[in-house]
Amino acid sequence: MADVCRRLGAAGLLIGTAGNVSVRVGDRVAVTATGAVLAQLTAGQVTVVDLDGKVLAGTLQPTSELDLHLGVYRRYGAGAVVHTHAPMATALSCVLDELPCIHYQLLALGGTVRVAPYATFGTPELAESVLAALDGRSAALLANHGSVTVGPTLDKAVENALLLEWACGVYQHAAALGTPRVLDEQQQLAVIEAAIARNYGTTRSLQEGRS
Ligand SMILES: [Zn+2]
């Protein structure tokens, strides 16, 4: 967890104590402590809880967004959750109702990214709002707050956070130049078909040919 937090920090996604990360192993969840500076996280700043939030190991109080993390595991069975106040994602979350599918890589997150309506941090209302926005997606923006990404593994959830921040930056640059074109449903379906046919995102040896 410390490694991935440093990776998020190096990519500019972390600001001070903002953000939290968790990973699930079976019915146990390791989660960053509230007040921890994520980019400099140590093992002692990770608390282990069960899926009801009962502390099993550690000495520090878990993140104030624990309800959100546990909700994702209970509802969607994910393996990891990353929440940040990353600058590009947060800027868009103050303006948009959704990040449209302006680039085919957004399909890796499920396409259009919804913006969950605003609620105070750490409340069950915010957790519910974000859980609804994540339906069928591995990313959501939190209105006037930040972003959440999920994945089957911690690495994948972090990768999704980096991808979302990149896409939010692309949208902002594009919107500054004009009205961004959005990929329509047919274009999105064609990408999914091509990705399946070509096993997109994995390296292949020359012997596998170019089909
Ligand atoms: Zn937050």
Image (cartoon, helix red, strand yellow):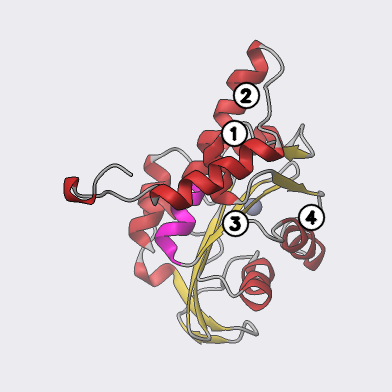
Instruction: Kindly check if marks 1 and 2 are in contact, taking CB atoms under 8 A apart as contact.
Output: yes
**Which marked residue is nearer to the observer: mark 3 or mark 2?**
3
Residue 161 percent coordinates (x, y): 51, 48
For label 2, the SS is helix
Mark 3 or mark 2: whose residue is earlier in sequence: 3
Q: Is residue 168 magenta?
A: no
**Residue to which mark 4 is pinned:** 120
The reply to whether the magenta stretch includes residue 155 is yes
Q: How many marks?
A: 4
Residues rendered magenta in the picture: 153-161
Q: Pointer 2: what residue?
A: 172
For image coordinates 82% across by 49% down, the residue present is 117
The image quadrant where one finds the N terminus is bottom left
Determine which residue is flagged by label 1.
Answer: 168
Q: Could you say where residue 4 lies in the image, as x and y percent from the top left?
A: 38, 56
Q: Amino acid at mark 2?
A: Gln
Return the residue at label 3: 138
Label 3 sits on a secondary structure element that is loop
Badge 3 crowding class, 10 Å Cα cut-off, few under 14, some 14 to 19, many 20 or more, is many
Could you say which is closer to the camera, residue 18 or residue 35? Answer: 18
Q: Is mark 3 within 8 Å of ligand 1?
A: no
Q: Residue 69 location in percent, x, y?
A: 62, 68
In this rendering, which labeled residue sits more in front, label 4 or label 1?
A: 1
Amino acid type of the residue tagged 4 in the rendering:
Thr
- State whether label 2 is within 8 Å of ligand 1: no
